[in-house]
Image (cartoon, rainbow, N blue to C red):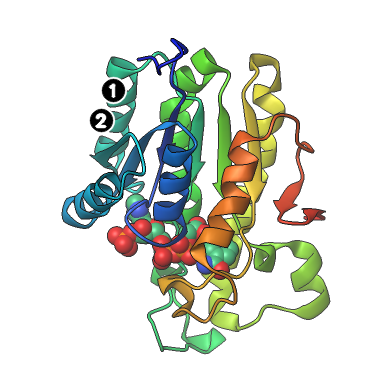
Amino acid sequence: MSDSTGERRRVALVTGANKGIGREVARQLAVAGFTVIATARDAERGGAAVRELVAEGAGDLRFLRLDVTDQETVAEAARFVETNFAGLDVLVNNAGITGITRGQRKELDELTVDDLRAPLETNFVGVFAVTQAMLPMLRKASGRVVNLTSTLATFGRVVKEGPQRADLLPYLTAKAAANMASVVYAAALREAGVTVHAVSPGYIATDMNNFAGTKSVEEGARVVVGVATTGELPERALLVESGTLPW
Ligand code: NAP
């Protein structure tokens, strides 16, 4: 697939692209000229978001159902990329959950293993599952993986200030595990020309924080898309809008 200059269009896949930062990342990547595989776990919500973006003239976006906790849909997405494209230039592992139901607060003693499972499955195992499945296509394109993380989940911050609230434990530990996966992948894939970065978008007003975030999805997505498209970036660092932060 080529653009009007005859060059191969770059291909990006975004998880959790039906709303929030992921939807806006998909839009901005499409505007930048990528063919974007915008994925979501719910076909109706995801399909509607992509139809809206295409109708707005954002560019070349395709919807694909992908639940990062459902290995069958992960494998199906990998087959889709392999069948339709020469490689995958950008993978944005955006899908994430806190595991906290809106407006509800739990004390530390109320947390159970079940509270831990869903955030770990989505934020950590899901990142691993999708990245592993896409590796052959990422290698073909010398692609880039961008993993969404949070400054709240850095050891530096939690050691110094403690967690904002105890019931963030599942989210913070899942993101911290994913951070380590980002660093391990980055080191292990360097020779293959595949780069892996973890980026925190800032405190963004989305469903995740009941729209308490202080910045817009446009601003958050700009940070993510910057990391997805900038040539040389600091390696094995936590990337934020202003540069890097210690883990
Ligand atoms: P959001 O509006 O709640 O969006 C989360 C997205 O992830 C939704 O599209 C959701 O789909 C999707 N998702 C959840 N579980 C999934 C699964 N199993 N498979 C596929 N998709 C799944 O939250 P957001 O703020 O945009 O968050 C996006 C990412 O940024 C997350 O990784 C989050 O941790 C990170 N982040 C956000 C902030 C912030 O201030 N907002 C700060 C730091 C990091 P459904 O609609 O189907 O639930």
* Residue under the point 77% across and 70% down: 157
Is 194 left, or right, of 134 in this rendering? right
Please give the residue where the numbered disc 1 appears in the rendered image. Answer: 79
Is disc 2 in contact with disc 1, using a CB cutoff of under 8 Å?
A: yes
Structural crowding at the residue carrying mark 1, measured as other residues with C-alpha within 10 Å and reported as few (<14), some (14–19) or many (≥20): some
Under circle 2, the secondary element is: helix
Is 184 left, or right, of 18 in this rendering? right
* Residue under the point 48% across and 54% down: 123
Question: Looking at the picture, how far across and down is residue 159, in whole percent?
Answer: 80, 72
Q: In what quadrant of the picture does the C terminus appear? A: bottom right
Q: Quadrant of residue 161?
A: bottom right
* Residue under the point 41% across and 28% down: 133
Furthest toward the top, the residue is 6
Work out how far the residue at label 2 is from the one at label 1, CA to CA, in angstroms.
Answer: 5 Å
Please give the residue where the numbered disc 2 appears in the rendered image. Answer: 76
Question: Looking at the picture, how far across and down is residue 9, in whole percent?
Answer: 43, 21
The amino acid pointed to by label 2 is: Glu
* Residue under the point 43% across and 10% down: 6
Query: Residue 17, can we see it?
Result: yes
- Ligand 1 placement by image quarter: bottom left
Structural crowding at the residue carrying mark 2, measured as other residues with C-alpha within 10 Å and reported as few (<14), some (14–19) or many (≥20): some
Is 57 left, or right, of 147 in this rendering? left
Question: Looking at the picture, how far across and down is residue 72, in whole percent?
Answer: 25, 36
